[in-house]
């Protein structure tokens, strides 16, 4: 009798989950962005959200929640109802860095989210003002070693993937290029363009327009291989083997969101991202489409936390 009860219970659970997948979604879905409107995450989201909403039969409402180094949005989603109606488009590296950068967080990146799928990636560009006395990565390394503490690089802020990407470069190249944090990518780029600072590590989508007009010199791209969006720019790994820093974007939901809902979101998102028209549009903005299964994303998040923890500690960066 007990076995029969357990069997009936399992059948009931299966039917309930299946019904959730069949009826989901029955209302608009909120996609939370941890940065301000107009930034790379926002541009990326608006590139695929309308089509995803069309395929799901409900609109995707983008909600920008900037603040606290992306933690405000992360905490909001982690504490939302796990029903698939509140999703988080996160930059995996930023959130992985925050696990070590902040001494206390009100959420856990691994435990408090259900992975849905990777979405896209974009590389960083190591760029220089045309007046700088170096035009390539080998020239930068040689100049920095011959002139200790005379070369600086700008980033969008202390503890960001851009800052720590520069520290990783110093470690692998044996240089001591000084970090100058700015309050965002725009002011950092402004000072490099104006010659107030020699170099910067910035997102490819933000830097490419200036590279294409000759206002910035592209020293190297941080993807492991050259980007199809900028095939003429060498990868830094061509000079520093295995050097790689990428801004990887992914969608997660609150922990304990039903698997049937996660699977439906994953399937529809992958379909949209591989739509030739959507793919072309997003690639044109400087992103590369990257998709995954929920389990693959979960493993990737864990690997990023393990990767960035030691680098954050070595850099001495802190948000406290």
Image (cartoon, helix red, strand yellow):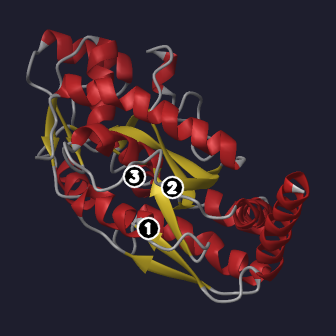
Which is nearer the eye, 256 or 317? 256
Q: Badge 3, how many Cα within 10 Å: few under 14, some, many 20+?
A: many
Does dot 3 land on a helix, a strand or a loop? helix
Given the current orientation, which residue lies at the most extreme front position? 1
Does dot 2 land on a helix, a strand or a loop? strand
* Residue highlighted by disc 1: 77
On screen, 243 above or below 22? above
Does dot 1 land on a helix, a strand or a loop? helix
Residue 233 in the image: state x and y as whole percent. 51, 35
| Image quadrant assignment for residue 103 | top left
Which is nearer the eye, 12 or 27? 12
Instruction: Looking at the image, tell me whether mark 2 or mark 3 is earlier in sequence order.
Output: 2
Instruction: Looking at the image, tell me whether mark 1 or mark 2 is earlier in sequence order.
Output: 1
Mark 2 or 3: the one toward you: 2
- Circles 1 and 2 in contact, beta carbons < 8 Å: yes
Residue 207 has which mark? Answer: 3
- The answer for how far apart the CA atoms under marks 3 and 1 are is 31 Å
Residue 206 in the image: state x and y as whole percent. 40, 57
- The answer for how far apart the CA atoms under marks 1 and 2 are is 8 Å
Residue 113 has which mark? Answer: 2
Quarter of the image where the N terminus is located: bottom right
Q: Is residue 32 left or right of residue 126?
A: right
Residue 218 in the image: state x and y as whole percent. 40, 38
- Circles 2 and 3 in contact, beta carbons < 8 Å: no
Residue 55 in the image: state x and y as whole percent. 79, 78
Q: Is residue 222 visible?
A: no
Which is nearer the eye, 276 or 248? 248
């Amino acid at each position: 009798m007990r076995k029969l009860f357990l069997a009936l219970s399992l059948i009931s659970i299966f039917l309930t989950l299946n019904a959730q997948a069949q009826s989901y979604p029955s209302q608009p879905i909120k996609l939370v962005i941890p940065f301000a409107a107009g930034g790379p995450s926002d541009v990326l989201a608006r590139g695929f959200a309308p089509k995803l909403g069309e395929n799901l039969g409900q609109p995707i409402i983008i909600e920008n929640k900037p603040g606290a180094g992306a933690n405000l949005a992360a905490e909001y989603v982690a504490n939302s109802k796990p029903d698939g109606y509140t999703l988080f488009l996160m930059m995996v590296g930023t959130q992985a860095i925050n696990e070590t950068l902040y001494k206390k967080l009100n959420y856990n990146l691994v435990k408090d989210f259900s992975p849905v799928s990777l979405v896209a990636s974009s590389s960083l560009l190591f760029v220089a003002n045309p007046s700088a006395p170096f035009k390539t990565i080998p020239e930068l390394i040689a100049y920095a070693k011959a002139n200790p503490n005379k070369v600086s690089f700008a980033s969008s802020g202390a503890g960001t993937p851009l800052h720590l990407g520069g520290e990783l470069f110093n470690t692998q190249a044996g240089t001591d290029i000084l970090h100058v944090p700015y309050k965002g990518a725009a002011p950092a780029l402004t000072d490099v363009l104006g010659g107030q600072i020699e170099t910067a590590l910035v997102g490819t989508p933000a830097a490419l327009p200036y590279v294409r007009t000759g206002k910035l010199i592209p020293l190297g791209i941080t993807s492991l291989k050259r980007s199809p969006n900028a095939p003429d720019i060498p990868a830094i790994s061509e000079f520093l083997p295995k050097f790689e820093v990428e801004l990887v974007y992914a969608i997660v939901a609150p922990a304990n969101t039903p698997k049937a809902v996660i699977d439906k979101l994953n399937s529809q998102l992958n379909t949209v991202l591989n739509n030739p028209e959507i793919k072309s549009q997003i690639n044109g903005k400087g992103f590369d489409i990257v998709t995954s299964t929920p389990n693959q994303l979960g493993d990737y998040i864990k690997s990023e936390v393990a990767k960035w923890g030691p680098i954050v500690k070595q850099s001495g960066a802190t948000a406290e």
